[in-house]
Amino acid sequence: MKTVNAIAAFVNKYLIYIMILLMIVSYFFPQPFLWIPARTTNLLSIIMFCMGMTLNFAAFKMVIVQPKAFIIGVIFQFTISPLVAYGLAQLFGLSSGLIIGFVLLGSVSGGTASNVMTFIGKGDVALTVSMTTVSTLLATVVTPFLTFILAGKYTHISFVQMLLSVLQMVLVPIVLGVIVHKLIGRYIEQWLQTFVLVSSVSILLIVAGTVAKNGSVIVQSGLILILLVLIHNLIGYGAGYGLSRLLGVSAKQARSIMFQLGMKNTGLAISLATAHFATIPAAVTPAAVGMVIHQITGPILANLVAKKEGKVYESNNLFTKLYYRYRRL
């Protein structure tokens, strides 16, 4: 167990650097990684199952305790983010494939990494855990619907098929994870690092496989795509915080919404693009670029906010600290 904890701590601490190194290696030497894209759905399901294993019914408590902030955060995720993505894609005249990918990126729920950034940035951890959990469940229906509405004119999109695939990738694994947690909850804490390590490795494999298969398309997309994904990310942060404050949400809760809106579930977007738009390689690139950008801007913003609040959180094991902080809430 000590060995697993040590490996998990190392991977968590240097995740972004490992990710960048894997991207470089998989781009120049794609062959060893080409087996991964066909298994992206399975890898995402593993991530969702591990997420479910760390959940209990307390994850939904902010729906009742702080309904205003919770409702605002969830609504923002499925309105502001997809509309901004669609607007930017139209404004800069992106190709139909990139528009589809951008809409997917904007339409998915907030990623689990936003929970960690909220903790570092001294936001409301219980609120962000609740938003991540509920928005991920809602994404099973909302993401296919938004993609169909906003991007359906660019290619044939089957709402039913996409709905079924998201249910398979997201809802079923989470529910199974919650059930297992309920059955063996007292043993969960000692295995927490194993779940985190498995999730991290799965994310890294998805990134490596995506770059190996679509690296040339990503490079050809050029600086404009990177810039637009960054703009979308920064607008998410700014709108999440600013509009929440205007609507009377506390600063602590607004920081939670900020990270939820800025850091999306790029793994889900990549999986959906791979599964449903395999003939349109460009569709996967916005989420692939977003996966890297979010992992860079999130920690920077979180530490800037924490510094402003008077404390910069330092740890080799952020996921564990987040977990125990949440358990005490």
Image (tube, rainbow, N blue to C red):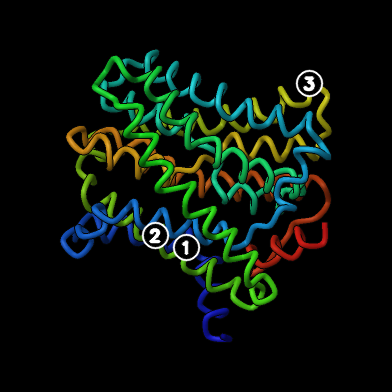
Instruction: Tell whether 82 sits left or right of 189.
Output: left
Residue occupying the far bottom of the picture: 2
Query: Can residue 289 be seen by looking at this rendering?
Result: no
**Disc 1 secondary structure class:** helix
* Front position in the image: 23 or 258: 258
Instruction: Tell whether 212 sits left or right of 248.
Output: left
| Residue 209 x %, y % | 28, 55
| Residue 10 x %, y % | 53, 73
* Front position in the image: 235 or 249: 249
- Position above or below: 10 against 300: below
Q: Which residue is mark 1?
A: 200
Instruction: Tell whether 48 sits left or right of 243.
Output: left
**Residue type, mark 2 in image:** Leu
**Residue type, mark 3 in image:** Leu
- CA separation in Å, label 1 and label 2: 6 Å
Residue drawn at (26%, 58%), measured in percent from left and top? 36
Quadrant assignment, res 260 = top right
| Residue 324 x %, y % | 74, 65
Disc 3 to disc 2: CB gap under 8 Å: no
Q: Which residue is mark 2?
A: 204
Residue drawn at (57%, 51%), measured in percent from left and top? 113
- CA separation in Å, label 3 and label 1: 36 Å
